[in-house]
Amino acid sequence: MHVHIEKEIKGLILSLPLVHPFRTSFGEERERKFILIRARKGEEEGWGEVVVSEAPLYSEETLGSAVYVLKNYLFPLALKCHLQTHCFEAGAERFRGNPMAKSGVSLALWDLEAKKRGLPLFKIYGGGREEIPSGVSVGIQKNLDGLLKRIEGFLSQGYLRVKVKIAPGWDCEVIKEVRRSFPQIPLGADANAAYGKEEVDRLLCMDEADLLFLEQPLYPDDLYYHSLLRKRIKTPLALDESIKNPRKMEVGYLMGAYSIVNIKVGRMGGVGRVLKAVRFAQERGIPLFCGGMLESGVGRAHNLHLATLSPFVLPADLSKTERYYRRDIIPPFEFSRPGYIPVPQGPGIGVDLDYRFLEKIQIEEFT
Ligand code: OSB
Ligand code: MG
């Protein structure tokens, strides 16, 4: 029996093993569990990704909290809005927090809308780039030698910028050694909020390594202490975890807490908020880069479209598929020339999903 579904929104919980374990100051991931959102209207379907982890380590959100909020609040809102982006995003502002859950729905609805209009998302966003400069984020390794070998491997493939994860005990010496081995490369360091305000003196050593940026050294709430650190350190500060929405971006700017912002749609709570933050950056000349959360191909396709906007002047945390997953749910992203990933040109996110593989890695679905 075939039932025609006019409008539908659904969550799929999936799991993919990472090619290489990814260690940061907050823990190690070997496998990525994530939620895909599928929004259907008539013949078209739009896809979004909820970039949560199982544990509340990067942020407060978890797989379980996202499922709860999607089922009980965000799916009903999306349906009430007839799956329209602006209605959904405006309605979602009423709910506190839960940006990754909100963003998953937002992305699916934007994809759906773009597909109905027959346009690639970047055209709707007003982006002008056809390929995105690609950087790579390198996790904490067992030893320095392993790190240097890994970086060398990535550089030989053409990555345009390397970001090294740091944590207390894996910071000054490591960064200085990396710089000594690779004197010329654009290099960043990301602490994932591992340092307290009492530990800032430790971070001044970064100035000896000629870094492009030091990302999120202090706790997410510590915008004020970031602004104090910024006065003492020459290395540009980039913020990630602290910039939870466009208001935090504005306050952080007024306080002088950062020079650069790492934009992640999941952390910000949806496309509308990212577009607002990007306008803010554009008006003030704030350099941005597009961050990553080890997304599946769906999330990375969305990131490619957002990264076409002009304030994204720095290489993105957006690497080739093979750096994350042996097999992905969309055809692999590769370089069109060394260091550049082409932006998909088809309608919406512009990539086709591998439905059979999707079924294989699915754990559960919910509406
Ligand atoms: O801090 O940017 C981060 C991955 C998971 C959680 C936080 C971060 C990251 C990355 C990976 O750095 C970037 C990527 O997806 O390539
Ligand atoms: Mg970061």
Image (cartoon, helix red, strand yellow):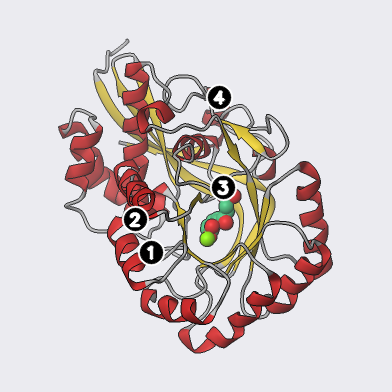
What residue do we see at 61% from left, 27% from top? 331
Q: Please state the horizontal and vertical placement of residue 36, each as a whole percent of the image.
A: 43, 38
* Position above or below: 310 against 39: below
In the rendered image, the quadrant that contains the N terminus is top left
Query: Contact (CB < 8 A) between labels 2 and 1?
Result: yes
What residue do we see at 51% from left, 82% from top? 232
Pick the residue in front: 144 or 134. Answer: 134
Q: Circle 4 is placed at which residue position?
A: 354
Q: Circle 2 is placed at which residue position?
A: 65
Cα distance between the residues tagged 2 and 1? 9 Å
Q: Circle 1 is placed at which residue position?
A: 60
Q: Please state the horizontal and vertical placement of residue 134, each as a whole percent of the image.
A: 63, 43
Q: Image quarter for residue 103?
A: top left
Cα distance between the residues tagged 1 and 3? 24 Å
Cα distance between the residues tagged 3 and 4? 25 Å
Q: Circle 3 is placed at which residue position?
A: 316
- N-terminal of the pair, mark 4 or mark 2, is 2
Mark 3 vs mark 4: give the one in front: 3
- N-terminal of the pair, mark 1 or mark 3, is 1
- Left or right placement of residue 277 versus residue 57 in this view: left
